[in-house]
Structure formats: structure tokens, C-alpha cells
Image: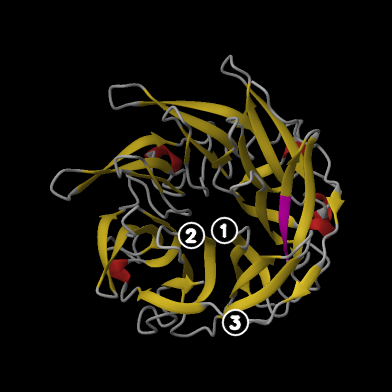
Amino acid sequence: MTRKCFLTALSLVAVTLASVNAWSSQFNVIYKFPDVSKGFFPLAVISDSSGNLYGTTMFGGVSSGNGWGVIYKLTQNGGTWTEDVLYEFTGGTDGGQPAAGLTMDASGNLYGTTSAGGDPSCNGFCGVVFELKHNQGGTWSQSVLHQFTGPDGLDPQSGLAFDTKGNLYGTTYDGGAHGNGTVFQLSPNGDGTWKYTILFSFGGHNPEHGLHAVATPVFDASGNLYGTTTSGGDMTCGGGIGCGTIFQLAPQGNGQWEIGSIPLHGNHGGEPVSLIFDESGNLFGAAFAGGPGMCQSIFENGCGTILELSPTAGGWQASVPHVFFGNPASNPVGVVPDAQGNLYGATESTGLFCGNACGTLFKLSKLPGNGWGFSVLHKFQGGTDGFAPFGPPILASDGNVYGATQAGGDLACISVGCGVIYQIIP
């Protein structure tokens, strides 16, 4: 298999930045979570070919306390969006507290991870990989594909990705051979069961490849797998814990995988939390912190950056399309590219506290040459419009951008709102 070498050092190319003040996009709140039974603290959403949205909430449902989270579907009818709760986690062997969004197979079945629940010997906090099967008649049934125990990983905070053979891939934040997280594969056995394999364990004598994986994995056209870690890499960065990495796992054709990584350095960004490919094969990531921005009042090491890796004949060329400086936006959680190469993204905060940092939605417009223009599409106010976006937005089949905020919306729900689903009409 021909594949590009993955760089082991970050060589950054400066780009020209320009401010864009056009507010041409339309922002809408399409759904406000009304009460705890419907879920609260929504995570990233996905869309099917009919335009329905699916997602998870970290909390909520009808189980004890504030609930262990739900899986839901949003359906539009005449301009109104209606929520159906498809499954409520119990926090037991079925899992609880999802920390990432879902993925869907060709049959409409949903797959994901939970950060809690699972194996009882784990005291309820190792997590699971689950499937929510779409049955005839419109019903849904949940099954657990794998329960984490610790040595095989624990606390998954990423979603899952399919390869072309139907295998599932994901990461765990902790656990594994060295306690610092794993990359894993689940392969269907043909009888309804799945084989679990650890592809790589972070830590040990190799902290340069990263510690604590978080981003939902993505594949390139050659079958290489990419993800991020929030620490590790250059251990002189981030006060000695490392500023994180972007890593690649390349299949070797014998069941083995070779790892390579790019360590992030403080001025270029740190704590990368999401990755996505555009149609040209460029890889974009959101570094939640780091960069030269002065965000010490909220985070100690910068306001975050947007990173780009472009394939070249010798490997990858890295650049920073945007650096956040705290005002009007900081701490990005992800971007999504459109067909023209523009990026739509969300930041968790605005550089100043707004109750709990409100956040923004933004656009990076591709300019002639190597430049990018930055514009804020919406500043969350911390009220009925939601606040603190969580997870990267998506570009749905209708051409609109969708995403979720952790709180805000219906302020009668747990006093600060249980979160909203938003829409950007470009």
C-alpha cells in the first residue's frame, strides 16, 4: 500500500489572515431540551439522508438522580422539530454518560460509546461500546458490543468510525497497558458478537506519541487512521505534561499498525479535540487551547487555534489558518468544511466569562492564495439561544450546519437550561 509518511515534528507555515465582518448567515435554535427526562447536556449530532438528526446527551432520562443520558432523534415536520427518545441509559451494564456523538451504518443502526457504566467490577465508570439497532416497525433495541475493564481501556470520550470492511474504531482516554488510553478495533464475528483488539496503548516509554486520546477517529483514502491526544508529545510543552499530538496509525497488511505523530507546541496550539478531512484530503483540527492568545483568566495556556495538515509528496505540510485571541472567540471545539473549502466552527467560550463561558459560531472563509477570513456568525448570550457549544458542528444533507450547546435554551430546565440544537443557514 502506498501511503504518505507522517511527520514527527510540526513545521508550520504562516498564512494571511483577514477579518470579515459580513454576518450573512442565519442562526436558529431549532430545539430546546425541555426537561431532564428528555436529556440534558447534548453532545455532537449526526444527520441521516432524510435530514433527521440523532444525538446523545450526557445526562438525563428517567433513571435515578439526574439520569445517565439518552439517545434521541429529531424529526422536522412543517418547520417544527420533534424529539423522540430512542434509549435511556441506566448506568448499569448498558453504560451511562455518553461523552461523544454517534455514528450510523448503512442500515440506519447507531453506534457509540459511554464514559461510565459497563462492567460492575469497574465501579460503574469504565464505559462501553454500544449499538442501537433500528428494528422493523420503528422500534430500537440496545446491545453492548464491549465492556471496558481498565487494562483494555477505560473512559472512552470519542465517537466511533467505520472502515470499508465494517470494522469499528475508537479510543479511550485512560486505561490500556500504561494507563494513558488506547486505540481499539471492534470486528464483527458474523454471529452478532464482536472481537475487540487494542491497536495501540499510549504512554509507557513512548509519551511522544501522546497521552489521553479524545477526538473521534477519521480515515484517509488509503485506510490510515488519525486521532488526537490532549497531552503528551513534546513533554517540554504545557508545564511538562505535553500539549498533545495528532497521531496516525497505518495498517501494515499483517494485522499490525505503525504509529506516527505530530507533537503540538504551545504557540501552535494545544489540547487538540477534533479532526476532519475536507474533500481535497486536507486534515483540519481544533486545538482547544494553546497559541499566543492571552486567555490566562480562563485557561493557562492560550485561547486555541485551528490547524491544517495538507498532503504533499514528502508527507504533510502544517499550517495554522486561525489563532484565537480571546475576543471575540476562544477555545474552539471543532470545524466542518463546505464544498467551497470554507470552514464553519464553534468555540466553547468568548474569552470572557458569560456565566459559564457563552461561546460563538464562526466561519473561516477561504481567500485567494493562502489566506483565510474570519467572521463571527453568532455570539451566544447565555440564555434561550444556548451557551457553551460542545463538539464539532456538522454539515447536513440540506446544506445547513447543525450542532449542540451544553446548556441554555429552556431556562426552566435545571435553572440554566438543558441545552439546545442550533442551525446555521449559510
Which mark is drawn over residue 336?
Answer: 1
Q: Helix, strand or loop at disc 2? A: strand
Inspect the magenta stretch and tell me whether residue 231 lies in it: no
Real-space Cα distance between discs 1 and 3? 18 Å
Segment tinted magenta in the rendering: 304-308
Left or right: 29, with 204 as reference point:
left
Left or right: 209, with 92 as reference point:
right
Pointer 2 local density, CA inside 10 Å: few below 14, some 14–19, many at least 20: many
Task: Looking at the picture, tell me which residue is in the foreground, 357 or 249.
Answer: 249
Q: Helix, strand or loop at disc 3? A: loop
> What is the magenta segment's predominant secondary structure?
strand
Could you tell me the amino acid type at mark 1?
Val
Real-space Cα distance between discs 3 and 2? 19 Å
Give coordinates of residue 227: x percent, y percent.
62, 43
Residue depicted at x 60% and y 39%: 181
Identify whether 74 is placed above or below 174: below
Mark 1 and mark 2 in contact? Answer it, CB < 8 Å: yes
The residue under label 2 is 395
